[in-house]
Amino acid sequence: MYMSADVIATIITAAALLVTLRGGYLAGLAWLSRRMDARFDKVDERIHGLEVELNEVKIVVARLEGPTPRLIYPR
């Protein structure tokens, strides 16, 4: 069974179109992944900065309040 040139051209064109669409899809996913990673890194830096600042505030408050009073005093 022989195929005409038109049928072969149509099959090759459809395959090329599918390969192109898949490549575009994968490139878009890679771009999205890089962008999300960059955003997550920025958010992680902000959270780390807030944790450091919160620890400093806790230390200052603890210094202002002094040691906690004991219920039983040592003799």
Image: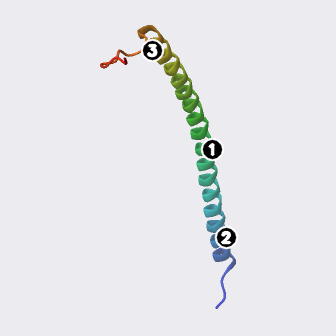
Nearest to N terminus: mark 3 or mark 1:
1
Query: Local crowd at mark 3 within 10 Å, few (<14), some, or many (≥20)?
Result: few
Query: Local crowd at mark 2 within 10 Å, few (<14), some, or many (≥20)?
Result: few
In the depicted view, which residue is nearer to us: 75 or 46? 75
Q: Residue at the location (43% across, 11% down)?
A: 66
- Please, is residue 60 above or below residue 21 in the view? above
- Residue ID for mark 2: 12
Which one is closest to the eye, mark 1 or mark 2?
Answer: 1
Quarter-of-image position of residue 67: top left
Dot 3 amino acid type: Ala
Which one is closest to the eye, mark 3 or mark 1?
Answer: 3
Dot 2 amino acid type: Ile
Q: In this view, does 19 lie to the left or right of 53?
A: right
Quarter-of-image position of residue 36: top right
Q: Quadrant of the C terminus?
A: top left
In the depicted view, which residue is nearer to us: 6 or 45? 45
In the depicted view, which residue is nearer to us: 2 or 53? 53
Q: How many marks?
A: 3
Quarter-of-image position of residue 35: top right
Which one is closest to the eye, mark 2 or mark 3?
Answer: 3
Q: In this view, does 47 lie to the left or right of 34?
A: left
Q: Where is residue 4 in the image (x, y as percent from the top left)?
A: 67, 81
Q: Residue at the location (57% across, 34% down)?
A: 39
Dot 1 amino acid type: Trp
Nearest to N terminus: mark 1 or mark 2:
2
- Judged from the image, the secondary structure of the residue bearing numbered disc 3 is helix
- Residue ID for mark 1: 31
Q: Position of residue 29 (x, y in %)?
A: 59, 49
Tell me the number on the disc at residue 62.
Answer: 3
- Please, is residue 12 above or below residue 38 in the view? below
Q: Residue at the location (58% across, 43% down)?
A: 32
